[in-house]
Amino acid sequence: MSTRFRQFLRNTTPRSVARYSIDGLGVFCAVILTWEHFYTVQRSEGPSMYPTFSVRGDYLLISRRHDRGRDIKVGDVVRFHHPSFLGVNGAKRVLGMPGDFVCKDPQFSTDVGGEKEMIQVPEGHVFLVGDNLPWSRDSRNYGPVPMGLINGKIVARVWPPSKMQFVQNTFEPAQIEQPQVD
């Protein structure tokens, strides 16, 4: 081992050190650029998105292209800066876009639409809910979330390998039958 290291030191020139340093710096910058502006991986924990994500935590692939709510639609799962806890990211499903009407349900309730009261999501905001309603702190608690707080769309679960899959939009458009006019 020491002979290989000595041979490496003998063959190393200042020019090769500079070249490797510049190449390493370029790779580092490319990784940081990708991590900050294209894709990132983050661990999720907690019961609010069960059964979509494990309570004990999954590693999620997050597309940063959807920053500030760009190209988000109802049913997508987004990552956002939590409005109640400084420095914390949350992950919830989009239930309402700007201008949509959503049911105003009590906090931590399991009864969807029980209050029979609707609110309209303001412009520039989204209404977010967890998939596990009784265990989710979401827009029912803190109201509609500004789209500027959205910092990505969750596109896939990447760990554990046995559960690796793309995150599906489980919402389907409502089929409203138009009355026949004779």
Image (cartoon, rainbow, N blue to C red):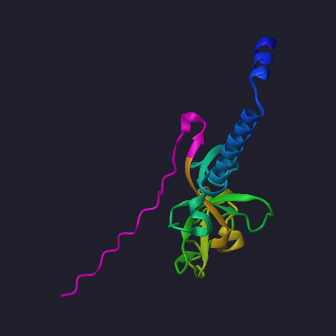
Figure check: 56 above or below 148: above
SS assignment for the magenta stretch, majority: loop
Query: Magenta includes 119?
Result: no
Q: Residue furthest bottom?
A: 182
Left or right of residue 113: residue 31: right
The region drawn magenta spans: 157-182
Displayed quadrant of residue 65: bottom right
- 134 vs 14, nearest the viewer: 14
Q: Residue furthest left?
A: 182
- Residue 58, visible in the rendered structure: yes
Quadrant that contains the N terminus:
top right
Figure check: 40 above or below 171: above
Left or right of residue 2: residue 124: left
Figure check: 75 above or below 101: above
Query: Magenta includes 175?
Result: yes
Residue depicted at 66% across the width and 69% down the height? 139
Residue depicted at 57% across the width and 71% down the height? 114
- 38 vs 104, nearest the viewer: 38
